[in-house]
Amino acid sequence: MEDIFITEGDRVLGRIVFGHGLEGVVPALEACAGTGAPLHVYMVCDSHVAGYADLVESHAALHDRVEICGKYMLEATEENKVMDTVLSITGRMLADGADRNALVLAIGGGITTDMAGFAASIYKRGVRFAYLPTTLLSQVDAAIGGKTGVNYDSYKNMLGVIRQPEFTYICPEVLETLPLRDFLSGASEMVKTFLIEDGGWYAKSLAFLSGLDTAEDKRRYLRDNTRTLLVLIHAAASVKAGVVSRDQFETGERRKLNLGHTFAHAIEKNARKNGDDITHGEAVAMGIVMAAILSERTGLACRGFASALAAEMKAAGLPVECPYPAGSLAEAMSKDKKAEDGIVHFVLLSRPGDVRIADMTASQAAGFLS
């Protein structure tokens, strides 16, 4: 499967590499080494997938152009996605003698890639980094596009920078052991991407997910349909890479990628406050439906669109009902990091493949939804 490139004009900013097996990440690292000394790699890994870091290290030992100089495990949770964790990464790199030629390899989901990329971006004013995403959410969204950062005061990704990784290595085999709930959380982001730019992929993704939802042996279903899944991942990554290439710093078109996210981040903040267990992907699915309802009530979408969309997503195993009243989300939405002078750029949709930006205050949006 062909690599995907993120560009700025004629300049390549980063690439998405598709391979089979963890051993494939080592040649990608070797390509970053150049002709001088071996590449010094510092791995930052979610402790839940520590075995993947061990495998990468064993494969790297067979190559003389890549040297693993540090391996740091972290507990990749939203609670730990804070500056203290980033500073602990940079502190360990400093203690291990990492210089400006170092490369940070993040192994894990979106929380891990966000923090490792941020740490690399600020360490000694910036060293290179690369991603080996191990969740569907990170393979189709979080590890693509260059956004890095941490949460602050319970607000999602409030501190961060945009900086592209050297590469993102997509390996479908790592998804075979992913818990179903986490897989479906990533599926929400994939569906979101195809709602933004369809080309028939929205229906194909729902058909794939509906088969997963009804399969008796869900792991076997994923193994038997690896090729279909990889094609869907490639299509979603292509959409996002194209949008990022055209608008890297989110001054216009890239805002469309936030479909459902203004609501989702507010839902997540409420969940943390109330001690409820809602994943990012689950909140995104709920947020997409809320965006569809807002689209109806502002006249952009025809009557019945939101309920039809909710029924399709629910049939695919995705959660669609927000447990909180719209009014309780207004304060968090008003403090969304993308809000400007009190105005929030809500992403609305009239049908799959047709999304638009509507500017309004958070209280106005909550009023439409109440």
Image (cartoon, rainbow, N blue to C red):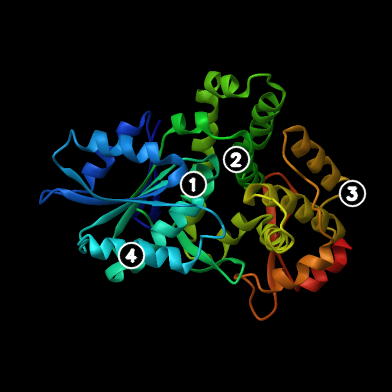
Residue 262 x/y as whole percent: 68, 62
Mark 1–mark 4 Cα distance, whole angstroms, equals: 19 Å
Earlier residue among tags 2 and 3? 2
Give the mark nearer the N terminus: 1 vs 2. 1
| Residue ID for mark 3 | 303
Mark positioned earlier in the residue sequence (3 or 4): 4
Label 1: state its secondary structure: loop
Quarter of the image with the N terminus in it? top left
Q: Between marks 1 and 3, how big is the CA–CA gap?
A: 38 Å
- The disc, 1 or 3, on the residue closer to the chain's N-terminal end is 1
Q: Which mark is residue 109?
A: 1
Q: Quadrant of residue 204?
A: top right
Q: Looking at the image, tell me whether mark 2 or mark 4 is earlier in sequence order.
A: 4
**Which residue is nearer to you in this view: 313 or 331?**
331
Residue position for label 4: 90
Q: Is residue 176 above or below residue 125?
A: above
Q: Mark 1 or mark 4: which is in front?
A: 4
| Dot 1 amino acid type | Gly
Q: Is residue 245 visible?
A: no
Question: Helix, strand or loop at disc 2?
Answer: helix
Amino acid of disc 4: Thr
Percent across and percent down for residue 84 are: 45, 68
Q: Position of residue 257 (x, y in %)?
A: 59, 55
Q: Amino acid at mark 2?
A: Asp
The CA span between labels 1 and 2 is 10 Å
For label 2, the crowd category at 10 Å Cα-Cα, with few meaning under 14, some 14 to 19 and many 20 or more, is some
Q: Amino acid at mark 3?
A: Arg
Marks 1 and 4 in Cβ contact (< 8 Å): no
Disc 1 to disc 3: CB gap under 8 Å: no
Q: Is residue 247 left or right of residue 313?
A: left
**Residue located at (86% from left, 50% from top):** 302
- The x and y percentages for residue 212 are 66, 26
